[in-house]
Amino acid sequence: MDFPICPKCKSENTYHDSIQFVCPDCAYEWTGDEIEEQDDNTLIVKDSNGNLLSDGDDVLLIKDLKLKGSSEVLKKGTKFKGIRLVSGDHNVDCGKLLLKSEFLKKA
């Protein structure tokens, strides 16, 4: 079986433990639904429903999110137009905000 390489240490020595993938070299665990980078350096980002997102898409927030360091709350259903995909933990650039794709769905 071909398992994906470890996104953290790039080791090919990975295995699947029925829930997630595990790298025995660096102890990193991932589900396989996170961002994947292909050889041509394009990001693959999936929303909360597993749909592929791309630059310029419109997305909706699926739950209320409190902004860290502020008393402001982003309400469920807030629409963000023309997103941009970036690498990192918060992988969707919505203009002034960076959000995680797991809290968004494609509009």
Image: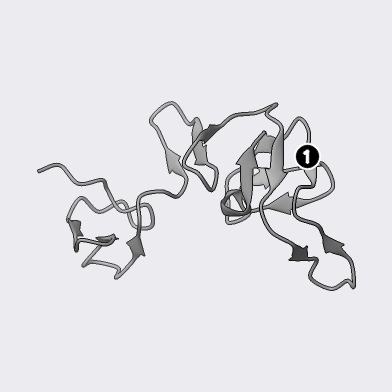
Residue found farthest to the right:
71
78 sits to left or right of 56: right
The residue beneath circle 1 is 80
Q: Is residue 55 above or below residue 78?
A: above
Residues 77 and 102: in front is 77
Q: Classify 10 Å Cα crowding around label 1: few (below 14), some (14-19), many (20 and above).
A: some
Q: Is residue 90 left or right of residue 43?
A: right
> Residue 24: x percent and y percent?
21, 67
Q: Residue at x 53, y 48 (%)?
A: 48
Q: Residue 39 appears at what percent x and percent y?
A: 38, 30
Q: Quadrant location of residue 22?
A: bottom left
Q: Nearer the viewer, residue 89 or 107?
A: 107
The image shows residue 68 at horizontal and vertical percentages of: 79, 70
Q: Residue furthest left?
A: 1
- Residue at (15, 42) in percent of width and height: 2
**101 vs 48, nearest the viewer:** 48
Residue 90: image quadrant is bottom right
Image quadrant containing the N terminus: top left
Name the residue rendered at 35%, 56% in the picture: 31
